[in-house]
Amino acid sequence: MFIARFFVLGLVALCTTACAPARGQGGAPGPLAGPGLSDLEARRTIPVDLPAADSLASVVRVGRMVFVSGQLPLGPSGEVESPRDLEAQARQAFQNLATALRAAGARPADVVQLTVHVVGLQPGHPALIRAAATAFFPAGNPPTGAFLGVAALSRADALVSVSALAMTPGLALDRSVAQQRRP
């Protein structure tokens, strides 16, 4: 678990550095920030209307990249949905993932990498989780990813957690935002 978190943190740091807008002459925003946008606006923590998770931020957007932290199978009340039912929990976690992606202007089809942590991973578990995921990802074009077995998650009844990296089309922010900031 420590190695997986270290790898993810390293990937975030690498992508944050690699995707940060280059500064031009006189400190002008670089090409990833878009017209009229600063570095601060190019990297944003996105507020999400989801039950409070146990992570620092649920969604961070850096340019076109969207990082979604592990989404647990939490329902609207903030409690784990369907204790002991892996497939139902996976459906809820994917629903929460879709909500988090939408908050950042992304869609499930934009996901390029998926990491699924499963408590007590068994050989049949990936098939159950894939079945739950089919409603969220386009047929014939699934993201890359991995299933990782863990001893426990941050919520006692949670059996699955889903993290994602998505790449959205277009500039870092919608051009209408940039137009509003022009003098």
Image (cartoon, grey):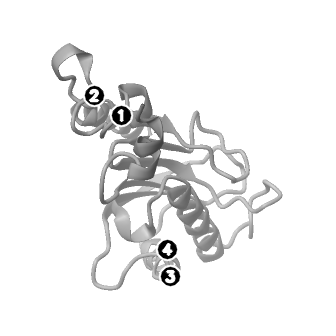
Instruction: Kindly identify which residue carries mark 1.
Output: 36
The location of residue 9, given as percent across then percent down, is 37, 33
- Is residue 61 left or right of 16 when viewed as pictured? right
Q: Can you say whether 8 is above or below 103 in the image?
A: above
**Residue 149: percent from the left, percent from the top?**
45, 55
Q: Earlier in the sequence, mark 2 or mark 4?
A: 2
Seen from the viewer's position, the closer of residues 176 and 135 is 176
Local packing at callout 2 (Cα closer than 10 Å; few below 14, some 14-19, many 20+) is some
Q: Are marks 1 and 2 in contact (CB under 8 Å)?
A: yes
For mark 4, give the secondary structure: helix
Name the amino acid, label 4.
Ile
User: Mark 1: few, some, or many residues within 10 Å (few <14, many ≥20)?
Assistant: some
Q: Residue at x 32, y 74 (%)?
A: 142
Marks 2 and 3, the one that precedes in the sequence: 2
Q: Residue at x 55, y 48 (%)?
A: 151
Label ID, residue 129: 4
* Quadrant including the C terminus: top left
Q: Residue pushed farthest front?
A: 183
Q: Nearer the viewer, mark 4 or mark 1?
A: 1
- Give left or right: position of 152 versus 83: left
Secondary structure at badge 1 equals loop
In the rendered structure, which amino acid carries the disc numbered 3?
A: Ala
Reading the chain from its start, which is encountered first: label 1 or label 2? 2
Callout 2 amino acid:
Pro
Label pair 4/1, CB-CB below 8 angstroms: no
Single out the mark in the foreground, 4 or 3.
Answer: 3
Residue behind mark 3: 135
| Residue 179 drawn at (x, y percent) | 41, 44
Q: Which of pointers 4 and 3 lies earlier in the amino acid sequence?
A: 4
